[in-house]
Image: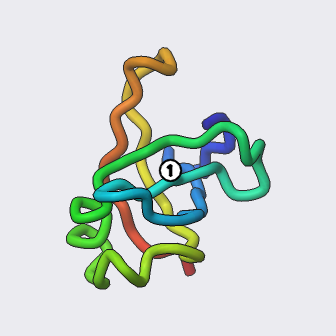
Amino acid sequence: MNDVTQDGEVRVLCLLLVGEHAELVVEDGDPEDVVRHPAADVAAQVGIPAAELPGKVLLVRVDGESEGDRRLSGFRLAD
């Protein structure tokens, strides 16, 4: 997740839901570089039902330097 905006956010696309998780990829990034995050958490932050997340482009803050240490927060719908 290297495509950071001026506000320190990354544009991600929610590909689909897998169980209780949303599968997220960097918009226009490698589709194999998937990050899973609890769908209920994402939905609560953006204010839509979890079932509506697939196909949505979101802005999110990524905390942590290494791949295993990534924490996502501050989800919001992209314009």
Question: Which image quarter holds the C terminus?
Answer: bottom right
Residue receiving disc 1: 9
Point out residue 66 in the picture as x, y percentages from the top left corner.
49, 15
Query: In the image, 54: left or right of 62?
Result: right
- Amino acid carrying label 1: it is Glu
Point out residue 37 in the picture as x, y percentages from the top left corner.
36, 48
Residue furthest to the front: 19
- The answer to whether residue 43 is above or below residue 20 is below
Query: In the image, 41: left or right of 32?
Result: left
Q: Residue at x 29, y 83 (%)?
A: 49
Q: Residue at x 29, y 53 (%)?
A: 38
Point out residue 61 in the picture as x, y percentages from the top left corner.
41, 46
- The answer to whether residue 6 is above or below residue 19 is above
Query: In the image, 40: left or right of 74?
Result: left
Question: Which image quarter holds the N terminus?
Answer: top right
SS class, disc 1: strand
- The answer to whether residue 10 is above or below residue 78 is above
Q: Residue at x 59, y 57 (%)?
A: 11
Residue 14 quadrant: bottom right
> 3 and 22: which one is in front?
22
